[in-house]
Amino acid sequence: MTAEEFAGYAKEYGDTVYRVALNCCKNAADAEDIMQTVLLKLFRETKDFESGEHVKRWLIRVAVNEGRKLHSSGWFKRRASLEEYAGTVDFESQEDSELFIIVMGLPEKYRVPLYLYYYEDYTIKEVAALCRLKESTVQTRLQRARERVKKALTKQEEDS
Amino acid sequence: MEEKYKRMFSRVKASPEKIQEVIIMTEKRRPRKIVRSLLVTAVIMALAVLTAMGANAASGGELFAKIVSYTTYTAEDGTEVAEMEVELDDKMLEGNTTGSFEIVQGEDGKAVMTYTDENGKKVTQEIDLEDADDITGQLQEKADKK
């Protein structure tokens, strides 16, 4: 891969890798580290990619793996609170900021499938392949995640 | 929920500086597979420098009496570096029988080699790797045996 090709992929998929990493580790500093590590791995990768989508899926898989590795290592950078981080993101509304807090408050095992399914529009089968999970597991996790988000949103409405 | 979720996450982005940092790192670095070509380059560069120094390099076969050492490594700034120490045929380079070559290859396919002789005298020359195939031949074969 030439430096020019790499720069194109880094610009196109950098945000995706970052979001996957953020969903994995829930910490912006760690997510940025993972993003850089994953992109450098792409640059060093010698396999031939068939398309941009192939590159994207490869990046997502590696990001998920790196996120798991970070979890198992127990090494995390100083954690800024979610509220603190949400304050740095230019959300369209307060409602979006609150949804972010709710979603990121879900257990890690729900966050990544949710992101890949709802944001990246991958099918359950594709999410299962990307996360190396069974399709039935993905289905269950998505269902539980939806229920939890719905419940949290309802509670929030009631409280306000 | 899907629409709200998409809208919300579309605002979550990586710092452009962090992405740029990686791009800059890779602009200075080439994949490991180029190391092999650096060996060839080292031999070519030796020929080029000897020519520049007025040696009778055109005689071919006995350019190197002995390759003392050859190493490649990644420098702190990420560039791939190849170093070759050779003992030269003193008929070709009177007075300077041992020197070292340091080759740094840039992203543009060009490499800069610095030859330092045993007295510390340096000669720097740039070469285009595209020209490599024409003049390797038996020199590469000689280097491969080391």
Image: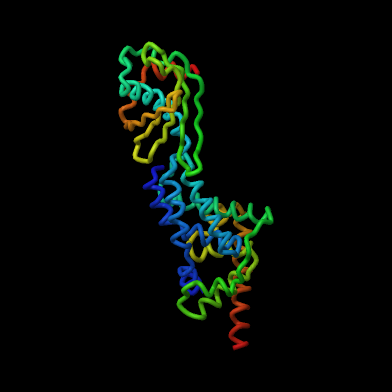
Taking depth in this image into account, of A8 and B52 the one nearest to the observer is B52
- Specify whether A154 is left or right of B106: right
User: What is the quadrant of the C terminus of chain A in the image?
Assistant: bottom right
Q: Quadrant of residue A48?
A: top left
Who's the residue at 43% across and 30% down the image? Answer: B38
* Residue B129 picture location, percent across and down: 34, 31
Taking depth in this image into account, of A85 and A98 the one nearest to the observer is A85
Taking depth in this image into account, of B136 and B102 the one nearest to the observer is B102
Q: Is residue B31 above or below residue A54?
A: above
Who's the residue at 59% across and 71% down the image? Answer: A82
* Residue B51 picture location, percent across and down: 31, 21
User: What is the quadrant of the N terminus of chain A in the image?
Assistant: top left
Q: How is colour applied across the structure in the image?
A: rainbow
* Residue A148 picture location, percent across and down: 63, 73
Q: Is residue A85 above or below residue A14?
A: below
* Residue B131 picture location, percent across and down: 30, 28
